[in-house]
Image (tube, rainbow, N blue to C red):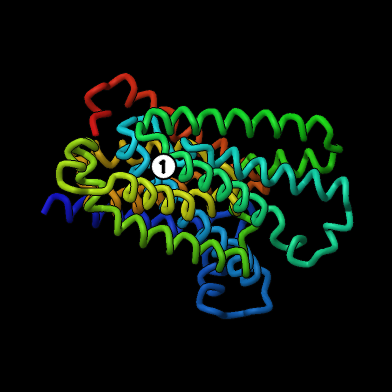
Amino acid sequence: MKKNRLLFLLFFLLFFLVAADVFLGSVRLPAADVWQAMLGNSPEGFAYKIVWNFRIPKMLTALMAGMALSVCGVQMQTLFRNPLADPYVLGISSGAGLGVALFVMGTSLFPVLATVSWLANLGTAAFAWMGALAVMLLVVAASKRLKSNMGLLILGFMIGSAGSALISLLQYFSDAPALKHYVLWTMGSFSNVTGQRLLIMASLCLAGMVVSVHNIKDLNIFLMGQSYAKSLGVSTTRIRNRIFLATTLLAGSVTAFCGPIGFIGIAVPHMCRMIFGNANHRTLIPASALLGASMMLLADIISQLPGTGSVLPVNTVAALMGIPVIIYVILKNKAVDL
């Protein structure tokens, strides 16, 4: 009963923040105008265009990003038995960043690429996704030879370092507009995910969530250690690859469309463990999805600086929200047990 009540409270919190994210924004709008716009009245009005063309797509993007990164964080922390593992621990963020840097650099060196219609519309997201996917395929290939999760962690770190080095090299040769484009992408934003982008991101996140739910039973077995899992006849390699697939779909899509948004994926799983008092993934997965979505919506609301006409980078706000939780987890050793 306690678990159900807590899940209901998380759902209520999410509902409240969904409404707040639609009603509040950098552009001040009367609540009555927002409500009328949501009802579909005055489709030619200013409020209607702001709500349906900007705020609702942004809200849906933040909601999906929070769910995706938090559910990824749960799986990574369980797989590696590391309380500081996050959705990007295997180098997905660096792979996506390298893809974006290659696209930005490529279009600055070869302007003709910008005239290709699909590249003009989805270029940044497409190259980020391809970079993330390439890294994950490399990790999956390496996992066939590396039986130790620690070896995979080290491999992920090295891939991330190599990606960062190549990105720095590309930045050195990049021109000012391309460099600005890349830096803005790294700050994170939910504002540019509309129409076709939103549909693609939603499809990828839904597929990742389906795989994650399918992983719940195996994740609970992993809590007892890989030796115990093998004694039950469970294929740890198959489970790892399925977790990698979920991570690529979820974290890869968020990074591709919104930029690398850190800390929420580390902090939320620990907050859920502290709130619910257990590590059962039948509870942790839905709880992390609800709380992660709420945290990301709150970060989006704060980043909008409602009514001021100014906007902060969402990555900065997410970091300021997540870092205190991570510090608390590090200082309280009992809170990091998986």
Residue 123 appears in the figure = yes
Q: Residue at x 43, y 63 (%)?
A: 207
Judge whether 158 appears above or below 305 on screen.
above
Q: Residue at x 33, y 30 (%)?
A: 83
Left or right, 297 with reference to 1: right
Q: Quadrant of the N terminus?
A: bottom left
Dot 1 falls on a residue whose secondary structure is: loop
Judge whether 153 appears above or below 282 on screen.
above
Residue 15 appears in the figure = no
Question: Which residue matches tag 1?
Answer: 144
At label 1, the amino acid type is Lys
Q: Nearer the viewer, residue 324 or 97?
A: 97
Q: Residue at x 35, y 35 (%)?
A: 147
The answer to which quarter of the image holds residue 168 is top right
Q: Nearer the viewer, residue 221 or 63?
A: 221
Location of residue 326 in the rendering, given as x and y in whole percent from the top left corner: 38, 28
Q: Quadrant of the C terminus?
A: top left
Q: Nearer the viewer, residue 332 or 214?
A: 214
For the image shown, how many numbered marks are present on the structure?
A: 1
Location of residue 200 in the rendering, given as x and y in whole percent from the top left corner: 56, 65
Residue placed furthest toward the top: 331
Q: Nearer the viewer, residue 69 or 317?
A: 69
Left or right, 185 with reference to 106: left
The answer to which quarter of the image holds residue 214 is bottom left
Q: Residue at x 64, y 45 (%)?
A: 311
Location of residue 169 in the rendering, given as x and y in whole percent from the top left corner: 76, 30
